[in-house]
Amino acid sequence: MIIALKDCPENTKCILIDSKIPDSLKNRLMGMGWIPGKTIQVVRRAPMGDPTIYLVDSTKIFLREEESRLITVKPIYPAPLSIVEKGTYKIVEFFGGGPRFVERAKTSGLAIGKTIYVIDNVLRGKLTVKIDDRVLRVGRGFSEKIFVEPIDV
Amino acid sequence: MSELKIALVGNPNVGKTAFFNALTGAHQYVANWPGVTVEKKTGIFRWRNYTVHVVDLPGIYTLRARSVDERVSRDFLIKEHPDIVLNIVDATNLSRNLYLTIQLSEMGLKTVLVLNQMDEVENMNISLNASELSKRLGIQTVETIATKGVDIDEIMEACLSNVPRVRYEIYPEDFEKSLRNFERIVDNSRELKNIPSRWLGLAFAEGDELAKSILEESGFLEKAVKCFSSKDENASLIIARSRYEFISSILKQVEKRPVGSWTVTDAFDHVFTHKILGLPLFISIMWMMFQFAFSASVPLSDLVGDGFDFLGKYAHQIPGWVGSLIGDGLISGVGSVLVFVPLIFFLFLAMGLLEDSGYMSRAAFLIDRIMHKFKLSGKAFIPMMLGFGCNASAIMTTRTIESEKERLISILINPFTSCSARLPVYAVISAAFFSKLAGLTIFSIYIISIVFALTTAVILNFVLKNKESSPLTMEMPRYQTPTIKGLWLYTWSRGKHFLKKAGGIILGATVIVWFLSNMPIGASLAHSWAARIGKAIAPLFAPLHFDWHITLALIFGGIAKEVTVTTLGTFAGGNITSFLKMTIDPIDAYALMLFVLIYIPCVATQAVMKMETRSYKWPIFSVLWSLSSAYIITFGFETIAHLVVR
């Protein structure tokens, strides 16, 4: 699935596909190693949600949402649940959540190794998943911390 | 004797300036954030029978320029034909740094690769085979740790060694063919014989505006379009990809990196850019910076103050006007400002700590959202921070801002960030009126300073029709432990400026004030020329409850803000506190601080504004705007405050 870089939450790794940013800025990004095919790691979002620090090669730079929404990427699995499309996945790890998050995940029946089916994900608001034959609505912030890998059924 | 012209080129923040200092024995300040060097700096040294001119250029990522500082570098390389280019690279980050190296060779420049920060390479457990790298690139390499000094012999020998020009034919075959065709046309032409043809072709294919305009002027545009026909629509991508493929094929052979480990920088960043902790930490750090400067400087300031009191007593024993000039004019005038030298040095020391450690870029990251709201680039933040030191030098650093409008706005709002020269004025007033709350009072002025700067930005955005802030790509440098030498260079190079001012312009202004207040001979202060001038202008400031002493002090303060204090010092004949208490009430005192914060940029700042905007219009606008806002705000504050208090 191809998505905008701005939709990738922290700790996501993805492959740069293309960017529609102005030519001269694109050129500078290329000079910093941002060429299609390179792996981008989303390091951190600023306290007020924008900008975001990205890591390419061994250079950390930060970009604003205005630019990152024009850059398309393909997530590398394990990817956060919040950005995967419809399909069947295995939960691989929890990333970036505290003990309370793990507790909440457990009570919702989400555990590492479990199979989860994504019914609907519009990249905005809650997403609908099915786990243990139960349909759940999962919040965005919550789903950003659950990393999954696709499995063939 | 032969002459050699060497240019230092490299990505931002790789240590070019440190290298420049080590090579030329200069003392340029080096910071740990990208964009310190915004203009070219030259140094000269002699080596054997050579006179070597070294030019330190602003950092660039590619040869395609977006902002003023980048243009300085590119234009120098194209137009000035340096004999040798020392390409300084961060050896821990070769894959990105070598991109520029390839471009430099394509420009036909004789390049020597300087692998800098070799100590970090060791710290990060990277193994690097420099001689193999040199062989594969076909250019000389030198390993250095510029912050610890360099081996000039080794560097110069590498520069002078006879290696053939390299030519990297690294692009796909059809593209190379088009490029060769183009090069042949250019090389055979008369008009373009001074322009490196390979660079011109590649830059044109990438869509570079400069290359296009060069071709247009010489009438070769059509031919160029024909050479790079539309089949290479995505030429810039092909070029970039080929370069990186070439780089990674080399690096595979010469470099071994440990697999991603958690570095110290990552750990610090985890805390300093934390979602919840980041901003409170930022505010506490700023507050600590001021507190540190104020508290740490008190004993020294007291000592200096006592020293001047002592000297003053002696001076008054000299009979006649000489004693009066030295005692009342120089010692109580200039002395009243020199008392704040320790404070200003400590403030710079604190700022130096923040800059050297690499925290400034993190601060820019944390605050960017707010800057964005005010349609300012994230890069506008750093000039604002530096404005708390000195507006004149801070305005120079706006050169890194790409959009012209944004840059102009950043220049115009900069004087409202309260520079260190205004600090003595606040300190004198708040010590006299708000004794226990002095620290808080001054902090409040700084907050107002930021608020007013941003408000002005909003108004200017509207007036200049600035719709959007320009895109931001800022690099996060590694954290570094500030060195004593680096901090000393930072503090001294800025503090020195303050001392020079005290010995020059401030001293001069003080002598003039003393002269005016003692003429005609024998007249008392109330009947002096100063009084006459002051009283003539005072009615203008009467609504603000400023009497003629203060009015005159403010007018002289336009030369340099510290002069406000020295003038009052001369009038007061030593005891400013009691003099001020007799002249104004606490509300007017706070109003005076507000007025000093906002009214007119000092002469030096006006000159820099003129230089950077290349027009008299903007400094004049700035003076009018700040003077009228200062008047209105001060008047408004006093009216309301008097109503409330009464």
Image (spheres, grey):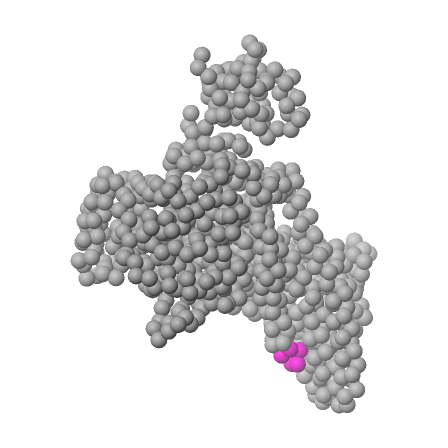
Give residue B302's position: percent from left, percent from top: 77, 68
Compared across the picture, whether B382 is left or right of B131 comes to right
Task: Inspect this view and state whether residue B213 appears.
Answer: no
**Which quarter of the picture shows residue B268?**
top right
Instruction: Choose between B136 and A144: the one closer to the eye.
Output: B136
Q: Residue at x 38, y 36 (%)?
A: A36
Looking at the image, the residue that sits furthest to the top is A133
Q: Residue at x 69, y 71 (%)?
A: B337
Compared across the picture, whether B636 is left or right of A54 comes to right
Q: Is residue B237 above or below residue B27?
A: above
Give residue B288's position: percent from left, percent from top: 70, 52
Task: Inspect this view and state whether residue B537 appears.
Answer: yes
Q: Residue at x 33, y 48 (%)?
A: B136
Q: Is residue B500 above or below residue B417?
A: below
Q: Is residue B168 above or below residue A77?
A: below
Instruction: Choose between B123 and B608: the one closer to the eye.
Output: B123
Instruction: Choose between A47 and B476: the one closer to the eye.
Output: B476
Q: What span is colored magenta in the figure?
A: B507-512
Give residue A22's position: percent from left, percent from top: 39, 43
Q: Main secondary structure of the magenta part?
A: helix
Give residue B380's position: percent from left, percent from top: 53, 52
The magenta stretch spans residue B589: no
Compared across the picture, whether B399 is left or right of B203 comes to right
Tell me the quarter of the image containing the N terminus of chain B.
bottom left
Tell me the quarter of the image containing the C terminus of chain B.
bottom right
